Image (cartoon, grey):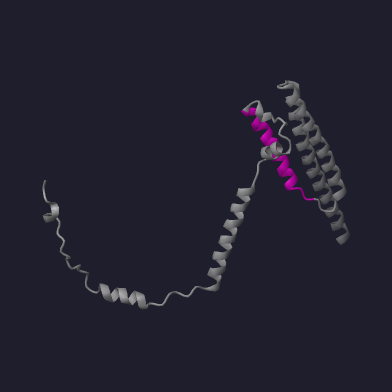
Amino acid sequence: MKDLRKDFNYEDAPIQMSEGHQQLFEAKLRKESKAVSRSETLQKSAAVLIVGLVSSILWFQTTPDQIQQNENPNLISLGDFSPEFQKIESFYQASINYELATLETGDYDDLVNSYVLEVEKIDGEYKRLQNELARQGFDETLIEAMIENLQLRLELLQNLKLKLTELKTLNHDSESIYQF
């Protein structure tokens, strides 16, 4: 067995620093830290707040499919039968949600409420079709009825937006006539 103690040098060798290293280090220590302005602090706080808000939204965000499953686990969606049906259903649901989210009622609350009530009735019919599909299994006529239901809801909301735009234009035109 070889004695390895001789191979290792246990003597502390002095460490050589470059010239002026210590003076540069001491100068950096003496240098005052940059004063943080109030606007920088506000910007950092706003950035943290935005990141926290976006994180919480993403954390708690649920998809429409998850909401449907939580409401009634017996309901079957179109996506349970094929990925193509899932794409169709997701497209229409997203479009319907977008139309509802971007709806500007203005002074026409009664008109909007009547359309929304009609959309809710049609949505109730959609849930009835889902229950029937869960009971009967794959049925082409039920699936077609569900897709037509989604199309009808989207068309109603788009028609409502057109009607509101027309009414706002007419209202604006009549106001401009009186201004002359």
Q: Is residue 35 visible?
A: yes
Q: How many marks?
A: 0
Can you give x and y, in whole percent of width and height, for residue 135 in the image?
75, 24
Q: Quadrant of the C terminus?
A: bottom right
Q: Does 120 appear above or below 82?
A: below
The front one of 7 and 179 is 7
Q: Does 93 appear above or below 56?
A: above
Tell me which residue sits at (53%, 69%) in the image: 40
User: What residue span does the magenta drawing correspond to?
Assistant: 83-104
The front one of 77 and 159 is 77
Can you give x and y, in whole percent of width and height, for residue 124 in the image?
81, 35
Residue 94 colored magenta?
yes
The front one of 111 and 27 is 27
Residue 11 colored magenta?
no
Tell me which residue sits at (50%, 73%) in the image: 36
In the image, taking residue 41 as reference, residue 14 lies left or right, namely left
Tell me which residue sits at (81%, 39%) in the image: 120
**What is the magenta segment's predominant secondary structure?**
helix
Q: Say which quarter of the image contains residue 38.
A: bottom right
Q: Say which quarter of the image contains residue 34.
A: bottom left
In the image, taking residue 155 as reference, residue 89 lies left or right, namely left
Can you give x and y, in whole percent of width and height, for residue 65 in the image?
67, 37
Q: Does 45 appear above or below 151?
A: below
The front one of 52 and 4 is 4
Tell me which residue sits at (85%, 53%) in the image: 107
Q: Does 115 appear above or below 87?
A: below
Can you give x and y, in whole percent of width and height, for residue 145 in the image?
77, 26
Q: Is residue 180 visible?
A: no
